[in-house]
Structure formats: C-alpha cells, structure tokens
Amino acid sequence: MSGVIRVLVVGTADTKADELLFVQRCIAEAGALAVIMDVGVGPAKAPVHIRNSEVAAAAGVPLDTVATSGDENVAMATMAIGAVCIARSLAGEGRIDALLALGGSMGTDLALDVAAVLPLGMPKMIVSTIAFSHLIPPERLAPDLTMILWAGGLYGLNGICRSVLSQAAGAVCGSARGVVPSRSERPMIGITSFGKSCLRYMVELVPALEARGYEPAVFHATGIGGRAFEALAQQGRFAAVFDFAIQEVTNHHFGSVVSAGPERLTAAGRAGIPQLVAPGAMDLVDVAGWQDFPPRLRGREFHAHNRLLSSAKTNAVERCEVARDVAARLGRSRSPVAFLLPLHGFHEWDREGGPLRDDAALAACVRTFRETVKPPTQLFEVDAHINDSAFVQRALSVFDGWVRTGIVPSPGQCATQRRDVSAESIDA
C-alpha cells in the first residue's frame, strides 16, 4: 500500500479525550494519520476531525436531541447509526485504510456496527473492556475483526492502559501497511466445509475447480467462518458457491453459540449468485466442548471433536424442522439454486455402521427435503454419501452445465469483463 495510512479512530471525546490523544500520538509515531471520529454526546475535550454533531446529523437527528434524550442506550444507538453512515462513506471513497475503536460496553456496541460495514480485508481493531466476552453475540462480529482487552482502561490513562493502546495502534498500522488486497485474477468460488475428519468433498472438489480456471476459497463453517462466507457473498465476490456445510443453520435453530446468525444461507440468493447447496452435517448441533450440554441435548449420542467442540445428534423431528427451514431459505433466492441430496448420509460419522448413524431419522429428513424443495430450486438426488467421489462428480456436472449455459461465468468471460472495466476507468 502506498501513501500515508489513514486510521479511522472512533471514541468518545467527552469521556476518553486523553486516551484518544495518546492513540493519535502512537499512530503518528508509526508513520500513519489518525482520523478521529467523536461519538460522544457531550462537549469534546480534545480536537477531533469528525465532530459528534456531524455524526448525529448523519443519523438524521440534531445532537441536542440526542444529548437530552435521557436514555444513554438510545443516544448511543443513534450515534451508531451516524457513525456507520460516515464510516461506510469514508471507506467507499477510499479515504480510510483501517479502523481502531475504543470503548467500554457502550462504545463496543457502537464499534461493532461500524466494523461490520467496512470491507472485508480492511484492518479493524476494537480495544474493548468486554473483548472476548459472552456478552457479544457471534453474529455481531465482523468476520475479520481483531479485538484486544482494554485492561485497566475503564477510567483514565495508566501504565497498563498505555501498553494496550500502543499495541493496538501499532498492530492496526502494521496491518494496514502490510495487507494484501483480497483480489483475484480468477473468478472465485465460495465453498463451505469442515475438516476432513467430517467432510471430505473439498479434497477432490478444489483441484477440479482450479483445473477449470477458478479460484476456490473454502470457509470453515464454525460460526464466524459462515459469517465471512455470507459477508463476501453479499458483496458479490463469488461467481458461484458450493454451500455444502450448512450446519450453522441447525446450530442457530438450537441456539448454539456456534452460529453464523439468523441470515445464514441467504446472502448468495439475495446477491444473485448461483448456488449449489447440500445438507452437510445439518443433522448435528455443535456445542462448546468445555461446557455441560444444554438440557435439550443431554443424553444424546455425540461426537467429541476436541476440547473446544462437541457435536450432538439430532432426532428425526428436529431434522425435518431444519430441512423445512433450509428449503424455505432457498426458495427465496433470486439466483439459480441446485440442492444436491446425498441419500446415504451427510457427514463421516453417519456412514453405514458409523457411530452416529440413524437410518430412520435420515430417511425422514430425505422425505422432507423431497416434499419441501420446490421449483425454481432444482433437487438432485445423489445415490451416494456426501463424502463419496460420486457426490463430487454429480456436483461438478451441475456446475459444468451452468457454465455451458452461462449461468456461471467462465474464466474467460470474467477476464473480458475485468478488461472492459479497466478500459472504462482509463477512458474516464
């Protein structure tokens, strides 16, 4: 990256003026420029670049109205709306290269909204008194967000606080200077999966797509990975997706912490991206391996993956509930959807004779998909297990047909489009 790095620094200049000024000095010493946005509602006690009155105006409310609302939660939520609008505009105009936000629980709440609207790949650091806390739901986290605990940072500067703030400033400046833009010369294909002990199709699928001239990107569908996948799909970054690990839908249905949020399995459809979807591991619920199972899941057969993660088996009724939900989400898609249904199982542990095999529940789930997956979604039954080569070959045959008919752009078409855009930019 050439030129001076510009870091958007977000904080409350009425209560954390000393901290903001210290961070500004740290950023300057790192050879970068701090652009301070004041999201407090009181008079600023330090010079800022974006005044709180501008933030409130961006939310469509006069600052006086915000400041006199008498409800600090409503006031900060209003300022969050304005901060999001300004940050999105600055990023879209190429006027900032990174984000560094400071806050307690209130400031963190606002900062999470700001981070969520900035492009994937732009460094984002939040210094928070509640970093890594269970108070923060997974769906609020930007996929590439970095957080650091603001130890000793609740009220005023001290030695511990200076150490944390200087570390954060140095980290975000270094990230912004060293980041490689997330661009590709080949059309990108988004794929969801788990590790090879659970799902193995990517072992054969990735080289097959590379041989066709595409760039596969495989996302680990353990909550935040699904968030990243959905965020990139929403941005239109994929030429097509192979969304074959949709367990995060089940996890959210059960209230698991391993969630990608309520909008999982929807972004590609809204963005018009062709989707190949399969029910990989959707008959399991992930739970934290270091906690007791919640009451609803106690007594279930489960797979202890490691000390962090265990996966409990769902019953027939639950699988059918999730299957209907999946079919409904796909039915709202604006893009072509192919649902590939492997008739012999959805993950390695439910193979014939496997420890989590349940023939009756599998059959009920298959029947529900047959009944609920309706046109325009295409249903392709595959007489194989999801980890069999026959499943991958069937998926590739559908994909190849889409390329031939122009539903999925070929690598040559994408290259031509890039050249056309470049020529327009030069002419302009």
Image (cartoon, rainbow, N blue to C red):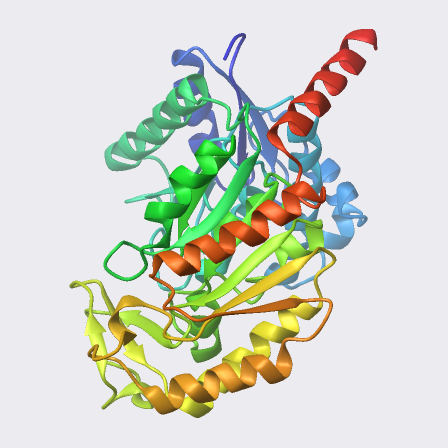
Seen in the picture, residue 299 relative to 45 is either above or below; the reply is: below
Q: Can residue 382 be seen in this view?
A: yes
Residue closest to the eye, 26 or 378: 378
Q: Position of residue 159 (x, y in %)?
A: 24, 32
Seen in the picture, residue 176 relative to 67 is either above or below; the reply is: above
Q: Where is residue 269 in the image (x, y as percent from the top left)?
A: 67, 57
Residue closest to the eye, 97 or 246: 246
Q: Quadrant of residue 348?
A: bottom left
Seen in the picture, residue 178 relative to 122 is either above or below; the reply is: above
Residue closest to the eye, 350 or 231: 350
In what quadrant of the picture does the C terminus appear?
top right
Q: Which residue is drawn at 46% across and 89% down?
A: 364
Residue closest to the eye, 368 or 123: 368
- Residue 259 lies left or right of residue 162; in this view the side is right
Q: Quadrant of residue 160?
A: top left
Seen in the picture, residue 237 relative to 175 is either above or below; the reply is: below
Q: Residue at x 50, y 13 (%)?
A: 1
Q: Position of residue 97 (x, y in %)?
A: 54, 24
Report the number of discs: 0
Q: Can residue 154 be seen in this view?
A: no
Q: Where is residue 276 in the image (x, y as percent from the top left)?
A: 56, 57
Q: Residue furthest left?
A: 307
- Residue 56 lies left or right of residue 218; in this view the side is right
- Residue 346 lies left or right of residue 266; in this view the side is left
